[in-house]
Image (cartoon, helix red, strand yellow):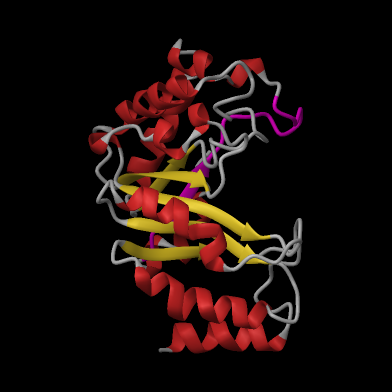
Amino acid sequence: NLPTWLYEHTYAKDRTLVIFWEASDYLIGGTNQPKFSYRTILNGNHDDYITSFAKQIKAYKGPVILIPFSELNGNWTPWSGTKNGNTPEEAVLAFRYVHGFFNNVPNVKFGLAVNAASVPNIYENRIDAYYPGHEYVDYVGVDGFNMGQPWESFSDIFSQPLNTLSKYNKPMFIFSFGSAEGVNKAQWLDDALNVQMTKYPLLKGFVYFNQNKERNWLLWSDQKTLSVFNDYVSE
């Protein structure tokens, strides 16, 4: 269900709720989940749920950016375009299909969030293969991370996908990003926020993945990194 408890932190403060909507069963895990393949969505197996969720968002009234199937050009989820019996063509059709349930939900905008690098890196799995079409997307964006091994700059990770997405002439977001710990983390974030992001006129914002998960992405993993972020948001 829609996490309505967030109301006081989002809509009540004139903020937009960004929802990553993922077709999977986390109790099962893994990529082999045939009950959540794109084919099942296109066959109408999940219509009741999608209809219910659309009604919940409409009742919420606050602005929502809905991102179905994030990082769909990766190979680590059941909604991957190359796993679970899926194809990139079905991913596009499923995105359009889900979009149709929200035609009368005016407070919803749709976002496409690809992974910075396509895995596997083959022509059929390129970013372009997942663009649903101008009328189905309000924002285009990308997720990417400096894993630290090897150390990669923001430009190393994002320049190619951002240039690819720019050609659609849609408002762009970095929908999820972060850097692993390291002596250069503060410098990495400073370069990302104050230099690299300014090069893309269509880039409207970002979501920093502030978690200690695969790496310690936390902004307060060290004081210098936190200071860079605090200085940025205070300007």
Q: Name which quarter of the figure residue 214 lies in.
A: bottom right
Residue at left offset 48%, top offset 35%: 126
- The answer to which image quadrant residue 171 occupies is bottom left
Residue 128 visible? The answer is yes
Residue drawn 40% across the image and 29% down it: 95
Describe residue 16's horizontal placement relative to residue 135 as left or right.
right
Magenta region, main secondary structure = loop
Q: Looking at the figure, which quarter contains the C terminus?
A: bottom left
Hey, which quadrant is residue 154 in on the image?
A: bottom right
Question: Who's the residue at 53% across and 50% down the image?
Answer: 116
Question: How many numbered marks are there?
Answer: 0
Residue 184, above or below 74: below
Q: Is residue 220 left or right of residue 177?
A: right
Position of residue 177 relative to residue 38, above or below, is below
Q: Residue furthest top?
A: 43
Task: Estimate the x, y position of residue 51 in percent, counting from the top left.
Answer: 40, 26
Q: Residue at x 56, y 62 (%)?
A: 156
Q: Position of residue 163 (x, y in %)?
A: 38, 54
On whether residue 231 falls in the magenta region, the answer is: no
Q: Which residues are magenta?
A: 15-31
Q: Position of residue 210 (x, y in %)?
A: 63, 66
